[in-house]
Image (cartoon, grey):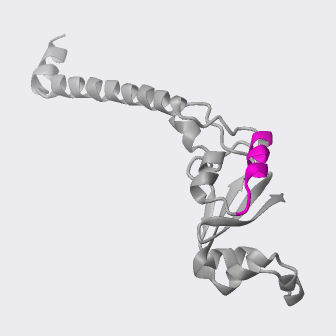
Amino acid sequence: MDNLLRWRDEHHMLPLVLVASIVVLVAIIAAALWSRGSIADMDTKVLASRGSLQGAYDRVQPGTSRPQLAQLGFDSNRLKARSLSGLGVQQYFMPATSRDFDQLDPAIRACFETPDRCSALIFPMAAPVLAGGFMAAHAAPATAERGQFVFLLKSGKVAYKAVEEA
């Protein structure tokens, strides 16, 4: 027992280290609980099924603006969409031959002529569904991507839309 008391007397910072450790542990637990509650409150489960995404896709008409796409359920941040600039659009839609180029939709061909006015949004068909918690929000999708919804925007409005099955 004398050794233990002598060791305690030689380590004057021990009580401070113990208190600091407890405070850090409580902070970690509180942050985990707060994070789980805030993510669970998010409206991320609305478009969880492919059927509801398909229904939203069917309501998209040419001339629909990007904010209107978000109102229909195609929110690029929430659904983790890829956004392509003009050059990315050209690369994405570039056909293998000139004959294929001639068969492209006129809206896509117009983007080859004026790439600065075009962009594209590509949404995965399997929308991410959060089960709750920080790890679920940042984890890789559990299922393989089964295809995607493609919206070509010219001057910020939908000019072309397509469903690409994987």
- Is residue 80 in view? no
The residue at 80%/41% (across/down) is: 51
Seen from the viewer's position, the closer of residues 6 and 34 is 34
Quarter of the image with the N terminus in it: top left
Taking 108 as reference, is 79 left or right?
left
Q: Position of residue 110 (x, y in %)?
A: 71, 81
Q: Does the magenta stretch include residue 124?
A: no
The residue at 49%/29% (across/down) is: 36
Q: Position of residue 21 (x, y in %)?
A: 27, 27
Residue farthest toward the bottom in the current orientation of the protein: 98
Seen from the viewer's position, the closer of residues 55 and 34 is 55
Main secondary structure of the magenta stretch = helix
- Is residue 70 in view? yes
Q: Is residue 58 magenta?
A: yes
Q: Position of residue 42 (x, y in %)?
A: 53, 34
Taking 150 as reference, is 31 left or right?
left
User: For residue 156, which quarter of the picture?
Assistant: bottom right
Quarter of the image with the C terminus in it: bottom right
Question: Magenta span covers which residues?
Answer: 51-62
